[in-house]
Structures are given as structure tokens and as C-alpha cells.
Image (cartoon, helix red, strand yellow):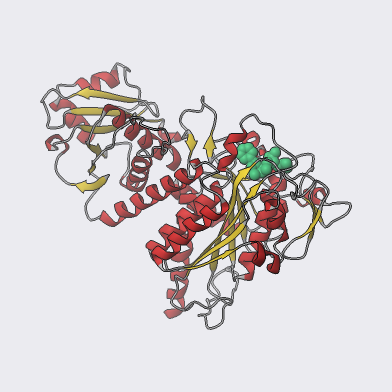
Amino acid sequence: MKISLVSAGAAELNVDALAIPVATGQRLTGAALELDRAMGGVLSEMVVNAEFRGRIHEVLPIPAQGKIAPRRVILYGLGAVHDLDGQRLRSAHHELVRASRTWGYKRMAVLRSEPLGADSLKAVVEGCVMGTFERRSRQTGAAPERREIDEVALVGFGGGREREVVAAQENGEATNRAREWQNAPANELTPDALAQEATQIAQRHNLEIEVLGPAELKAGGYNLLLGVGAGSAKPPRLIRVRYHGTSSSPGGEGGSGRMAAPVGRGEASTENVPVLALIGKGITFDSGGISLKNPENMSRMKDDMSGAAAVLSAIDVIASRKLPLDVMAVIAAAENMPGPSAQRPGDVIVSADGKTVEIVNTDAEGRLVLADALTHALRNGATHLIDLATLTGAATVAIGHAASAATSNDDDFWSVVDQASREAGDRVWRLPMYADYRILLRSQIADLRNSEYGEAGTIMGGMFIAEFAGGKPWAHIDIAASAWNTNDELTTILRGPSGAGTRLCIELAERMALRGAELRAMVAR
Ligand code: BES
Ligand code: ZN
Ligand code: MN
């Protein structure tokens, strides 16, 4: 899909459909009103008569009958202006494009008119690109229900913004790539296949890549990851892709020879430049293991690698955009299966950083593999950590599908994550980590237990992982609900795989790169 900024008048565009945004309770204004006049007032008639209300996901095609160059006008709804955040804005455009694909339009235009501000360009492009997503079918000879759009012209967004369009298009496509991986069946996307996907990304951008298999995992003491993967015939993988975005780090790990970052105002003094670790849970199938899940909806557990999908897609964009920041993606990939060599409830395992863990429930496997993945990131010089994981069913209870649930040990780092989330239209909501809960992690026999805390399931998942963050700024994003909306009644949240966390990670890296550059400029002065 080609997306371009055009300066021609909307009425002159030779397109199949021209889309005009409308918010509830608002009348047409500006360029939309001019078009309405050219069409003899039919647009405002639909709005004034409340046949079109501007509700989010409402789309109404109207024949232009030769009065203007576009063949159709589409009124599309944004909902109430005070409800319109980045995520809903993207969702509205996702729906606009999906509807247009159903109707078979090839060339489209989107008019920027109130209530869309000039700053909505990124959200509009990302939403439209996400609307092109179609789960790849494995059906033989099935005809696609929706067609492809060739071109989208953006009218009235201002000139000279081509780079913003390209970047937003990349973000949308990265989100869709994550969605495709989420949807891939577990017999296709095994831990090794995930490692191959990572290798392809690394090769494309000439990045450092390391894939640890069982022998190396054993040598490194990554017993929690090994334990989770022990029941499966498909061996686990610990995948690390490293992007060097600052010239001062020519391949060396651990900080030697790096430019020292200055001590900024209220900024923690780190000796090295920041190294952001994007850590993804990559359970390619979660049967629960010996603590076997209920068969109902178990097939959905093919998406238990959604965190891995998000961080892989993100580092692909970060590297291709050559962001001035050091970033690594770490993926703990395994299949959680019962079997003769599977770990048992009651087993005690020594983690890579030496803490002992009682496996009370083999179905609480995400926190186990993430614990070792955090240790691996720290061993490789990470200074800031963010993990993304389909970790707890309780996230659906606490927050539902409309946002990811988060925990963090650092208010400053969290505020950057929070801002990135708003900018990316990829919602996160932080839950508290009260010290009082820490006692619930205790085991009679080991340092920690992985389950049976009695309450606060999503928070406890975060608090378990926090034990392995080495005191570094860390945020945990539980995407168990946000990665895949299964609630058919919740229609304005993307249904099926959403790519949750992809744009969040990209935006976080962008913000950290920007801050690093500002700090460097401050010393240079
Ligand atoms: N992958 C699941 C969490 C999940 C559940 C994701 C539903 C998406 C939808 C995770 O590994 C899991 O099984 N969590 C347990 C933890 C419990 C045993 C402490 C859960 O949520 O029940
Ligand atoms: Zn799981
Ligand atoms: Mn599980």
C-alpha cells in the first residue's frame, strides 16, 4: 500500500473513496464543509439527521454522483473527542481501511479535518497500515474476503512530512509482522523457528546474534529456561540480537572503551551509555506442562510468544532506522509440555543468577524463563530492562483487553515508558508493587516459589520477575489480555492478534535515543 501526502484539493482527487472523519456531536467544518456544499449538502444532512453519528468504527459510504472527482465519500466515526486517545485513533483508521477493503476500493484519500489535528499524522498512517492486516490463511483455495488497497493519499496534513509517513508505515508494518507471528501455529513456529526468524532480522541489518541451545544453556546455568523446555521434544533457545546504535561501542560488551554518559539533572549516573534490553516471553506453546491446562481454549496458547514477536519486530525497525541507542532483544523461547522428562510441581531449580526456585505450578512458566532472560541481558551489559509477556490470565480480570498491565521498579524509567505508550497508541497501565506482597513469593524450601500467592496474580508475576532485575530500571508489560482480544462484545479493541507492545518498544527506544542525544549535546556546550 502506497501512502502519500498530497496538496491538491480533495474534490479534485481521482480516487475510489475520500474518507472524512467525524466525531460524535460535531458538525462538518472547513474542507469537509466545502465538499459537503459541492455535493449539495448530503453529507451534513446525514450528520444533522443523526443517520451518521460519528461513533467510533461507524463507517458510511455515500455515492458522489459525479459532483466531485472521488467516486465515493466515506464518513467515518472517531467517537467522542474526549475519549480519543492514540489507541482509539488508530482503531478508527484500522476499521476505515478494513471496511474499504471489503467494499473493494483501490485508491483512497483521507481528509484531515476537525477533529483530527495536524499531529494525528502518525496515528492515521499506523492505523491505516494495521487495517491492511489479514491473518495468513492455511486454507487450500480459499478466496480472500477483503481486497487490497493500492494507494492512500493524505490530504491536508501539511507538506514535507514524508519521513514521518515512512516511519509510521514501518511501525504499522512491524505491528502486523508481530500479529502474523502470534497467529502462526505452534507446529510451525517452534523455538528453533523463532531463532531462525531472529537470525534473518540480524542478517538483514548486520547485527550481532547469539542463539543458545541446551548445551550452552546448561553451561550458562540457565536452568529455569531448561526446566520449562524439558518436557518438549523441541529444545529451548535463548536468543539475543544486539544492535549497536552509538559509535562509541564498536562491538564490545561490558562497557570498556565506551563514551561516558554525563550526569544529568536528577539522572542516575551510569558510567556507560544506556543499553536498553527488550525481553520477550517466547513460549511457542503453553500446555501448562504437568500442571496441564484445561483443554478449553488451549489452542489459543500458540500466542504465548507474543512478547517475543513484539520485541523482534521492534528491533527490526530500531536497526533499520539506525537509532542512536544501544539495544538488545532477548527472547526466552521454549515449549511448555508434559512428558517423561518434564519438570514436576515441587521441583527446586537453581536459576542462572543463583536463586533457588520452587516450581509449585509448571503452568507459571513465563516468569521462570523471563528470570533467566533478565540475567542473560544483565550479563550482556543491559542498563535498562523492559520485558513483554503473556504472563497471567489475571491481567484479563484486572484490566481486560483494552490495555496491557504493567509493573515497574523505577518511577523515572516508568514515566518514559508511559509517555512512549501514549505516543505509540499502545496502552499500558501500571499496577502497584507493594512491599507487603513480597512475603507471598516465599517458599518453605527455596528462595522463591513461582505460584500460589493467593491474590494479586498479575502483580505477583511482576514481583517475581523483579527479583531478577539486578536493581536496574525495569518495567514488566503483561500482554496476556492485550495481545489477543477474545471478547466479541469488545468491538473497538482489535480482535485477534494485536501486536501489543511492538510500537511501545519502538517508541521507547526512540525516546531514550533522544534523551541520550540531548544529554550529549549538553556536555558538548
Ligand atoms: N500463558 C499463560 C497466561 C495466559 C492465560 C495468557 C490466558 C493468555 C491467556 C501463563 O503461562 C499462565 O499459565 N499463567 C498462569 C499463572 C498461574 C499458574 C500463577 C495463569 O494465569 O493462570
Ligand atoms: Zn504461558
Ligand atoms: Mn502457563
Figure disc tally: 0
Q: Quadrant of the C terminus?
A: bottom left
Which of 345/497 is in front? 345
Where in the figure is residue 430, as x and y percent of width and height? Answer: 61, 47
With 523 as the anchor, is 218 left or right in this view? right
Is residue 445 rendered to the left or right of residue 452? right
Residue 164: horizontal and vertical position, in percent? Answer: 31, 54
Q: Nearer the viewer, residue 464 or 298?
A: 298
**Which residue is depicted at the point 25% across and 46% down?**
2
Residue at x-position 46% and y-position 59%:
315
Q: Is residue 359 above or below residue 95?
A: below
Most foreground residue, 160 or 357: 357
Above or below for 512 versus 313 = below
Ligand 3's image quarter is: top right
Q: Is residue 68 visible?
A: yes
Task: Confirm whether residue 457 shows in the render.
Answer: no
What residue appears at the point 85 percent right and 51 percent down from the top-left corner? 443
Q: Is residue 447 left or right of residue 79?
A: right
* Quarter-of-image position of residue 35: top left
Q: Quadrant of the N terminus?
A: top left
Determine which quarter of the picture holds residue 215.
Answer: bottom right
Q: Quadrant of residue 40?
A: top left
Give the residue drawn at x 68%, y 56%: 225
Q: Residue 308 vs residue 379: left or right?
A: left
What x and y, as percent, mark residue 446? Answer: 84, 56
Percent coordinates x, y for residue 241 in the rendering: 51, 64
Q: Residue furthest bottom?
A: 257
